[in-house]
Image (cartoon, rainbow, N blue to C red):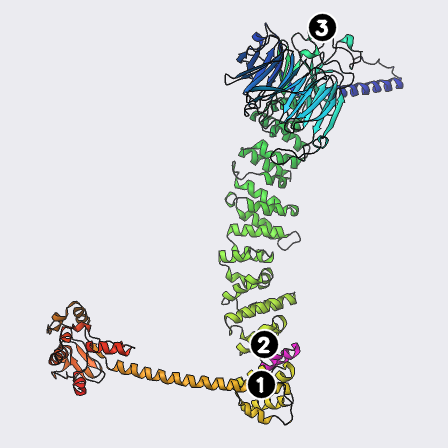
Amino acid sequence: MQMAPIPSENGVEGDDEREDEEADEEEEEEEEEEEEEEEPRLKYQRMGGSIPSLLANDAASCVAVAERMIALGTHGGTVHILDFLGNQVKEFAAHTAAVNDLSFDTEGEYIGSCSDDGSVVINGLFTDERMKSDYHRPMKAIALDPDYAKKGSRRFVAGGLAGHLYFNMKKWFGYKDQVLHSGEGPIHAVKWRTSLIAWANDAGVKVYDSANDQRITYIERPRGSPRPELLLPHLVWQDNTLLVIGWGTSVKIASIRTNPNKVANGTYNHIPAFTTNQVDIVASFQTSYYISGIAPFGDSLVVLAYIPGEEDGEKDFSSSVPSRQGNAQRPEVRVVSWNNDELATDALPVHGFEHYKAKDYSLAHAPFSGSSYAGGQWAAGDEPLYYIVSPKDVVIAKPRDAEDHISWLLQHGWHEKALAAVEAGQGRSELVDEVGSRYLDHLIVERKYAEAASLCPKLLRGSASAWERWVFHFAHLRQLPVLVPYIPTENPRLRDTAYEVALVALATNPSFHHELLSTVKSWPRAIYSSSPVISAIEPQLNTSSMTDALKEALAELYVIDGQYEKAFSLYADLMKPVVFDFIEKHNLHEAIREKVVQLMMLDCKRAVPLFIQNRDLITPSDVVSQLLKASNKSDSRHFLHLYLHSLFEVNPHAGREFHDMQVELYADFDPKMLLPFLRSSQHYTLEKAYHICVKKELIKEQVFILGRMGNSKQALAAIINNLGDIEEAVEFVSMQQDDDLWEELIKQCLDKPEMVGVLLEHTVGNLDPLYIVNMVPNGLEIPRLRDRLVKIITDYRTETSLRHGCNDILKADCVNLLVKYYKEARHAVFLGNEEDEARAKKKDSKAYQETEKSSSLRTTGVKSKTRGAARCCICFDPFSIRDVSVVVFFCCHSYHASCLTDSTYTFSSKKGTKDASSEPMSHYDYDYEYDDSDEDDDQKSANRMRCILCTTAAS
């Protein structure tokens, strides 16, 4: 760059010219920097492996890429299967002439090829399966069914110079060709995606739906484009609906709409063909170069551009023939948008490019996830590779990776963009440290504290010392609150002081009180001491800087410090619903004494039972007094009613001094409960309660109070005159048990015929209806008197019948009970010790008949008449001198058990009764049991022991 001439000393204009020239130079430098700042999109490398040796004596003609391998066709008719490093895996000598096109199926298990020798060959890559079809004319394009390996139909489409597009499938008797289209010149390209087949001939591009068996669309060949023999059209499916067409210097992107009439099983409704699918050209543009290949690149396109030679530079690209051999320029890979905006351009150093034509190059891209050939976006983890094939070279193009991008950004001083790239996780750890350290210092200098704080977790990571250094540095700058959300609590864990300084910084700034609360809740309690933070907050309690968030944070700190009563006080003031669980958890029932109003306003349904259960700690007087002093009188009265009502239900006498107030509260908030309260309570003033009921027009309550005050007549008048309920009046008079009141009721009803009739109906059982009838004035017309008299008589008869029935039942019960008592009186009572009873159960009848006179038996004391001087009525020995059991009868006779047994058998033997002598002693009934059935009693009478004296006398 030339400098401007030096101006003269007094040449002011010269100075101006120099300044203008320097400004122009700076602008030019900035423009050059902007041009240089454009980052490349792709990076390139030649494929090695077997490629150099394979192409040494042959020339590449086409390429296809599957998920696991690459197929390379040559002019010698050979198909080479390569891995992604270029190493040959398999080789098929499929043809005798140049291979024009290759196609994989979706699974990458079959490779199809077509050649100028007129044959189409499909080889299995993992099996020995091979299929060959001869069409006797050069075949230029082939596409396998994407599901070729899955379906037994083995379908493919192919076409060539004959102008026929063959649709081949396997039938019962072998493979059969169907001509899908013909008559519009040679088939130059064909691509198959799902059920859609796109092909290009001399007329243009057509799309056929194999599932619907009909042609979808026709896209005309670009006008003025070179002959297809010189510059082939290129078709690429970007996804199931987008078809990218590159032909000559024209690019079109067609969108095929999904058939809305397709049903769930894959069939189509029978509708006209023009309504089944629609095709829209969503993008179209012209280029300044010939298109030798095209492929999708995300939302953009990768175009392999062939640049005409300098001699053809001024010619019209739409009509000129490609450059003559020996004058061609390097092919270029251009990344363009759908609007033809060039995003990147790279010239490829291909071997022998000077001698190649546009159709000598081909471009293929790595398959998308789940598809071997056509379309869509790559899945996460897939590497979008592009393969540029020339006769003697294969170049791999792929996007620059993150480290390439980061290095380029660092070279240009763009730390922010470099850090953003590092955050993607693709860069090495060394890059993170390098970018982070430089960028963090830059942000602090620029006073972008919040941004610097947000980057600290990524930049400082697990270094505790680095974190502490930046915490105190932010505190020194008074910017620590912006760093607090990012300070780690573990891995690494900092010193206690760092956390305490951070919390104090939040507490002293009102705009960060909410952050303080969330931080106190989220940080573990063990990493800091709460005392310094509490000491910093407590002076603000009664100042204007005290906010609800700061109060709650202080409460949380009190909890951490074990000061539960102070925490409860703040929770109650803040009306936090957790306060009730907090009380139960920490047993703070004594602390609720001063927070009655707050707890009631928070949740009266939980507060009322709490106060009642702890009324020994907080008396009803305390609760009532606080509620009466509340600022909101309407709410406080309602709360007072709820509390006193629940207290009365638990203990009617606990709040007796407030029963007068409770009468008024019931009248205001729950009038239905007032009457039960009046009936249950004895601690309210009747006059006050009566005035309240009169004021509220509560008639039934007035009646009850008047009756309780002794004004029964006034109460009765209120029932009759105000309520007009004679049934209520009858019930009231019945409860009073006052005959004068009955007469008053009758008198007040005599001038009301309807009430007289109702009175007649409801006094049965309480008052003689004849008495009422006699008092009715002559000539008084009583509605439905006849029916009512019939009812009275019927009820009277029913009552009489019920009384007679009850008397009969009573008499029968008395007789049954006397009989039962008589039977019980006939039973004996056996008095003995437990050893005798156990022995009696174990002995058989004969052994038990022997008299036991063992001295080891314990004497059983005989109560009543058997004690002391009582004697046996058979042997006349006192009971006290013999250790045997005693049997006592209700007739006051008593016997030794042995004497009675011997006498019983003697008496039975005299009668000649043998069965009685064989009965064991243990079977006799000594208890109070009885038999309701007389027949059973007769049957068992032989087995029961009877008094000998009484039985003999009866005999």
Front residue of 689 and 99: 99
**Mark 1: amino acid:** Arg
Say which quadrant the N terminus sits in. top right
Is 796 placed left or right of 893 in the picture?
right
* Residue annotated with mark 3: 325
Label 2 neighbour load within 10 Å: few <14, some 14-19, many 20+: some
| Picture quadrant where residue 193 is located | top right
Front residue of 392 and 431: 392
At a point 55% along the width and 10% down the height, the residue shown is 93
Label 1 vs label 2, nearer the camera? 1
Dominant secondary structure, magenta: helix
**Mark 3: amino acid:** Gln
Which secondary structure lies at badge 1?
helix
- In magenta, the rendered stretch is 685-706
Disc assigned to residue 660: 2
Spatial CA distance of label 1 from label 2 is 45 Å
Give residue 878's position: percent from left, percent from top.
13, 82
Spatial CA distance of label 3 from label 1 is 133 Å
Question: Can I make out residue 705 in this image?
Answer: no
* Residue annotated with mark 1: 788
Give residue 849's position: percent from left, percent from top.
12, 73
Upstream in sequence: badge 1 or badge 2: 2
Which secondary structure lies at badge 3?
loop
At a point 39% along the width and 83% down the height, the residue shown is 809
**Mark 2: amino acid:** Asp
